[in-house]
Image (cartoon, grey):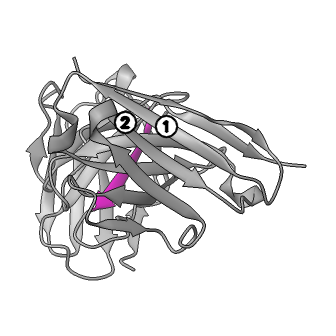
Amino acid sequence: DIQMTQSPSSLSASVGDRVTITCRASRSINSLLSWYQQKPGKAPKLLIYEASTLQSGVPSRFSGSGSGTEFTLSISSQQPEDFATYYCQQTYRTPHTFGQGTKLEIK
Amino acid sequence: QVQLVESGGGLVKPGGSLRLSCTASGFTFSDYYMSWIRQAPGKGLEWVSYISRTSDYTSYADSVKGRFTISRDDAKNSLYLQMNSLRAEDTAIYYCARSEYSEGYSDYWGQGTLVTVSS
C-alpha cells in the first residue's frame, strides 16, 4: 500500500497568516493527489485535485503544488472559516490512502 | 443539485451484519465510480472500497476484505455496502462519494451514516 504522511499533524495560525501543509507519498503517485477540508460534524469537502487544480467554488487563497512524492497545500491568507482539518489522498493505486490529517487551529 | 444520502447505519453486536445504502440524485449515477470511506470517532479518514461504473471492478481495503461487499443498482441510483462479521473497530461514520474515473478524486460526498459495533 502507498503510505501518505502529512506534516505537521497540527498547526496554530493567526488570521491572515500564510499556511503550508506537506503530504509525502511512500512512492511516486504522479499528480494523483487530492486535498480535502473537513469541519467538525461535516463531510469532507474537495479543495484541490490532481495536485494543483482548484475545485470549482473554492477560494483562490487555496493552492496546491507538487508531483511524484511530495506535495503541498497552501493557504495564502488564513481566514476564520479555514480553521478545520485537512487531509490529502492518493488515487494512484488502491487502496486510495489518506494522510493522517492536519488540524489547523486558531493561535 | 448533486446529492448523496446514506442510510442503514445503527447499533449492531460484534459478529453481526448491516447493509448500508447510498441514494444518489442530481447526476447520472451510472457514469460514476462510487466509493465508501469511513471515519472512526475522533480519527482520520479511511478508504474502504470502490466499484466501477459497470460493477466489473471492485476493490477493498485489507481491513474489510472478505467481510464487506460493495454493489450498486443503477436502476435505483443506489450504492450498497454489505458488512458482515462486524468488529468493534468497524465503528465509524461511513460516507459514500463519487468519482469520474478509477483514479479520480471524490468531488461529492454524502453526509454519512454512523455504524456502532458494540455488545
> Are labels 2 and 1 assigned to the same chain?
yes
Which amino acid type corresponds to the residue marked 2 in the rendered image? Answer: Ser
Q: Residue at the location (46% across, 28% down)?
A: B111
Question: Could you tell me which secondary element the residue under label 1 belongs to?
Answer: strand
Mark 2 and mark 1 lie on one chain; the one further toward the N terminus is 1
Residue A62: within the magenta? no
Q: Residue at the location (48% across, 28% down)?
A: A42
Residue B49's disc number? none
Q: Which residue is mark 1?
A: B21
Question: Could you tell me which secondary element the residue under label 2 belongs to?
Answer: strand
Q: Which residue is mark 2?
A: B78
The reply to whether residue A86 is visible in this rendering is yes
Give the image location of residue B75, x and y in percent: 28, 34
The reply to whether residue A8 is visible in this rendering is no
The rendered magenta stretch, by its main secondary structure, is classed as: strand
- Kindly check if marks 2 and 1 are in contact, taking CB atoms under 8 A apart as contact: yes
Give the image location of residue A28, x and y in percent: 20, 80
Viewport quadrant of the N terminus of chain B: top left
B41 and B68: which one is in front?
B68
Q: Chain of mark 1?
A: B
Give the image location of residue A34, x and y in percent: 24, 53
In the image as oriented, which residue stretches furthest toward the top? B1
Give the image location of residue B50, x and y in percent: 35, 57
Magenta span:
A84-90
Q: Chain of mark 2?
A: B
The vertical placement of A85 against A91, above or below, is: above
Q: Residues within 10 Å of mark 2 (few under 14, many from 20)?
A: many
**Figure quadrant of residue B78:** top left
Which amino acid type corresponds to the residue marked 1 in the rendered image? Answer: Ser
Residue A89: within the magenta? yes
